[in-house]
Amino acid sequence: MCAARFAAASQRDAGGVIRRGETPRLGGTTADGDGEFCAAGRVDPDAVDAWYLGIYIDALDWVEITNTRGMSQYADGGIVGTKPYVSSATYIDKMSNYCDTCYYKKAVKTGDRACPFNSLYWHFYDRHEPLLGNNARIQMMYNVWRKMDPEQRAALLIQVEYYLDRVDEL
């Protein structure tokens, strides 16, 4: 499930991780959305670790697993990262140029051509509220979620299920 997404993102990357075996660290774990997609999309963290270790020429397990499992995936329960690194299209657009040519509309949250990262973002926070709801570093996002119109919240969760059911088509 994740490999196709990783491969597509890697080939879009300036220089391409497949050709060079490396990307800027920020691009490799956060801003390009690969890690966020996997964290929010319920991809097994072991598969993400294996992918990063296999694809990056400079990946060392003692560094890469800490970064992917702890920061990108927040799969260590907060030992390394004090908050999960998940992002909506707003942050991805701010930190990269991937949205410039994307089929999806970064500002659209639900409906036709809504950016998948927007609903994935809120889905992640909704799914992990029992664990993260009191985390001071992300309290503002939970306040936004809790104050959001219930119909909008429901629409976001329906949208994300639509995308998760069709992940190979994204």
Image: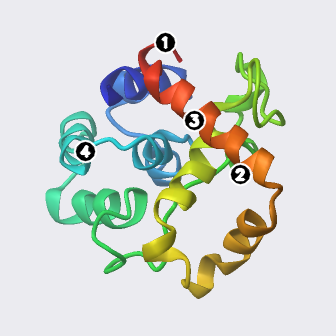
Near mark 3 (Cα within 10 A), the count class, few <14, some 14-19 or many ≥20, is many
Q: Earlier in the sequence, mark 2 or mark 4?
A: 4
Disc on res. 169: 1
Distance from disc 4 to disc 3, alpha carbons, whole Å, reads 18 Å
**Which residue shows up at 49% across the image and 75% down it?**
132
State whether residue 17 is above or below residue 125.
Answer: above
SS for callout 1: helix
Disc on res. 44: 4
State whether residue 103 is above or below residue 89.
Answer: above
Which residue does the numbered mark 2 point to in the structure image?
91
SS for callout 3: helix
Question: Marks 1 and 4: in contact by CB < 8 Å?
Answer: no
Eye-nearest disc, 3 or 1 = 3
Is 42 left, or right, of 144 in this rendering? left
The picture places residue 8, in percent across and down from the top left corner, at: 46, 20
Q: Earlier in the sequence, mark 4 or mark 3?
A: 4
The picture places residue 104, in percent across and down from the top left corner, at: 72, 22
Which residue does the numbered mark 3 point to in the structure image?
160
Q: Quadrant of the N terminus?
A: top left
**Which residue shows up at 52% across the image and 45% down it?**
27
